Amino acid sequence: MIRDGRDVVASLKARRRPENAHAAVKAAAARWARETTEAIKWSEWDAQKALHRPGGNRHILLLRYEALVANRSTTLKQIFNFLEEDFDETQILSYSKKRVRFNAIDSIYAPTIERGISHDRLRAYQFNLPLFDGRGRWRQMPPRGLSEEDHRLVAADADFQALLRKLGYV
């Protein structure tokens, strides 16, 4: 899944203590550029390999978070079709009503810096939430969004900016 890198940076920054915020912004921008580039590379590789597979089936489906949020039902149908699974919209879209555990953690409380934000605790909490619209979160003021200094840091990252342009985010 690909998401606007600025929103990814804002999300990752929000998990860090304020004194580490600028380092977190730089690291998050580099991480997004690296991981998104790899996802695109593997998707393109898969598309080439699919040309030689019986039936031309692809093994990688690259989606955009923004499409999932904007057109939830259509995007989920696309995923289920790719997986060759039946799609029951009522059951799928009501998933958040049934509590689930992640790595043996059952968390109904939002992780905070004070409680500790471990990856597993955060995922356990998020698994039990309905899908929310986090598009454009980077435009908000801190702590949710990016500060003016954060904007300067990501603007100075040439790889980050080039990838945002390639993907049509800017």
Image (cartoon, rainbow, N blue to C red):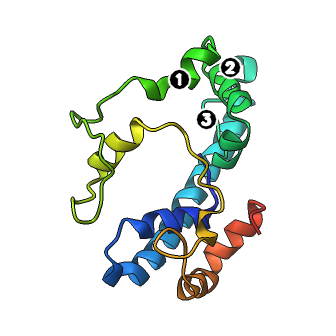
Mark 2 residue crowding within 10 angstroms, few (<14) / some (14–19) / many (20+): few
Viewer-proximal residue among 139 and 84:
139
Q: Secondary structure at mark 2?
A: helix
Q: Earlier in the sequence, mark 2 or mark 1?
A: 2
Q: Amino acid at mark 1?
A: Ser
The correct choice, above or below, for 156 with respect to 130 in the image is below
**Mark 3 → mark 1, Cα distance in angstroms:** 26 Å
Q: 117 left or right of 76?
A: left
**Mark 2 → mark 1, Cα distance in angstroms:** 19 Å
Residue at the spot 30% in from the left edge and 35% down from the top edge = 102
Mark 2 and mark 3 in contact? Answer it, CB < 8 Å: no
Which quadrant holds residue 57?
top right
Residue at the spot 62% in from the left edge and 54% down from the top edge = 3
Location of mark 3 (residue): 60
Location of mark 1 (residue): 94
Q: Secondary structure at mark 3?
A: loop
Q: Earlier in the sequence, mark 3 or mark 1?
A: 3
